[in-house]
Amino acid sequence: MPLPFSSAKVGNFSQEPPQLDNQYLQDTLLRSFLKRHIPSDVLPEIDADLSRFGHRVATDIYDLHLRCEREPPSVEQTNAWGQRTDRLITSTAWRSMHHISAEEGLIALAYERKYGAHSRLYQMAKLYLYAPSSGLYGCPLAMADGAAKIIENLDGCSWLKERAYTRLTSRNPQLFWTSGQWMTEKRGGSDVAGGTETVAVKQADGSYSLYGYKWFSSATDADMTLTLARVVDEEGKTTEGTKGLSLFYLELRDESGKLNNIQIHRLKNKLGTRQLPTAELLLYGAKAFKVSDEGRGVAAISQMLTLTRLHNSINAGSSMRRITNLARDYSTKRKAFGTLLKNYPLHLQTLARMEVETRGATLLALEVARLLGREEVGIASETERQLLRLLVPVMKLYTGKQAVAVVSEGLECFGGQGYIEDTGLPSILRDAQVLAIWEGTTNILSLDVLRALAKSKGAVLQNFALDVSSRLAAASSNAQLSSPSAKVRKAVEEVLGFAARNTSQLEVAARDFSYSIARIAVGSLLIEHAASGVGTSQDVHAAQKWCDQDLTPVITAAEASAYTLDSISADKEMVFDGFLQ
Ligand code: UCC
Ligand code: FAD
């Protein structure tokens, strides 16, 4: 006799979900890069810390990360009596990230310099593990790091070093501060000089009162910020353009938590990074202190940009790593047409392409971290300093875009599940999309590459070519790497030749040119790594595959004629074809 009740039938099958294992122990590239560069007497200590942390980012920290996404911040502008409160409400998970960041020394590691030039690389390796489990807390950390860098290098200003630098670099969660970076206003975030309307009025005590509207301010729960404004002179006038901008330090709240003449106008309603409170802020007399020479604001904040752009690329590489690891694991659990996905050569090829892109982006970011570490302790050569200046925008523009492509491909590896919110997968793509936009868009960074070229009067390109050549020389005795090396050499010749022949077209070619530099840089790094003492047959394969699939420099793929006035005019006709206004 049938039972009167039964539970709904949903079938007997349920898919085993993808699993996160220790993210450090799984990461052969990260580990071998550290082994290659960190002296053997200190490596075990660093290795032990990263192994422990690699487990945390897959367990307790990952749980907090998911909670940050589920419990986004909000703002209470007024209380029940209509009084203005501007109270920013963040989740306990988000606030736990603050504690973890301090305790794990995620900023401190770089400034304690316990491991000299290797300290920066160690910090970035740790952030690489943290980023995809950080609930976007990597964003305030990036800005805190950039602010610490600026303050550390200030001439004098001992009060600020005492007050802010010690907190930004503290391991004590109660003392630890994060920073904002307010550059963007309504008129412009790329053209900061054209966009900044904020003015600074000098006060009798030497401080300034800032009046303006900051259009994007991420991590509004930060303790301090660095921002740009125009000093009002005695006649009440300001100077237009870059020369009118100075850099200011301000604290967001006083000891009692009251905002410093700042109103949180609204929180941005964003595609991704929803864990992160990004606000529009009205400054109506915020008390601030000038920390650059007058008119040197952009040059002064560019040190911060170097740091935040490196964080951006570390995030880009690690989001690619995260999705690739998850997709790889899933391929061992999901069956289609009677067998596991990993058994299909076509699926494996997709994973392999993602893997190569991930390795390339990661290697480029780690190399920049290594160079920065050398620069910070004063042992970088002039060539290395120039290389760093060139590679920062190249790295940021390339890895930001690749992250979107690889993460998008990664979601497809899960089929329909890749599109389902509570798998935790779609947010990886949403959050990756911002990596190409903030901290300078792809085009703006391409133009920054040209700025670096101009500043060095072209010497940086020659140094880049020499650097590539010396990396390839290390692979000369490895027959398996001779064909990839030849491809890189040819690409260098073509790209440098193009730059020399087409100086007047470089602005239009800037993006393709920068991509070409990125591809050559990554190719040479993969080859060098494969040829080094830590290189494995997988590293050799990755170098070969990169040079086959990615190396063709964009700049030579398109004819130089693509950048002429005629071609631009034809592009314009086509783009505006049918445009009605
Ligand atoms: O988006 C933002 C925060 C997001 C949250 C944080 C995320 C961190 C990652 C975390 C991952 C989870 S903050 C906003 C970021 N905004 C930008 O990146 C601005 C984009 N625009 C640019 O970068 C432009 O190129 C500007 C604003 C720098 C261009 O301004 P100007 O006024 O045209 O600049 P000039 O006149 O060319 O340069 C002024 C001075 C020069 O120095 P001098 O006078 O000594 O010759 C330049 O050489 O600044 C110097 N300079 C630089 N120096 C300019 N850019 C650089 C640079 N990149 N490095 C060194
Ligand atoms: P625009 O400058 O208007 O650019 C629009 C388009 O034009 C872009 O594609 C750009 O590449 C292109 N373009 C512009 N000029 C040129 C040119 N000369 N040649 C070719 N192409 C060009 N900013 C802060 O200061 N602090 C923050 O904390 C912060 N947080 C952010 C958080 C999020 C989630 C987002 C999305 C943005 C944040 N920003 C922040 C702002 C961000 O830095 C800017 O949005 C970004 O720099 C671009 O500026 P814009 O929006 O004014 O774009």
Image: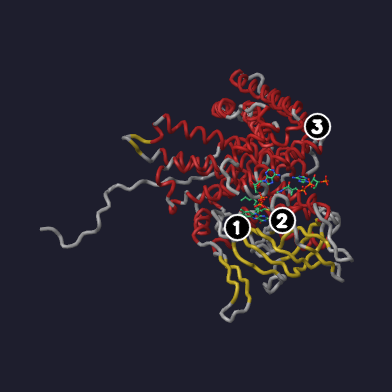
Q: Residue at x 67, y 72 (%)?
A: 257
Q: Residue extending furthest left?
A: 1
Q: Are marks 3 and 1 in contact (CB under 8 Å)?
A: no
Is 221 left, or right, of 501 in this rendering? left
Quarter of the rendering containing residue 344: top left
> What amino acid is labelled 3 in the image?
Ala
Task: Name the residue that disc number 2 marks.
Answer: 183
Q: Which residue is mark 3?
A: 459
Q: Position of residue 424 (x, y in %)?
A: 47, 51
Q: Earlier in the sequence, mark 3 or mark 2?
A: 2
Label 3, label 1: how many angstroms apart (C-alpha)? 43 Å
Q: Earlier in the sequence, mark 3 or mark 1?
A: 1
> Mark 3 to mark 2: distance in Å?
30 Å
Determine whether the residue tagged by mark 2 lies in a helix, strand or loop: loop
Image spot of residue 336 (x, y percent): 34, 37
Residue 109: image x %, image y %? 69, 50
- Which label is found at residue 100? 1
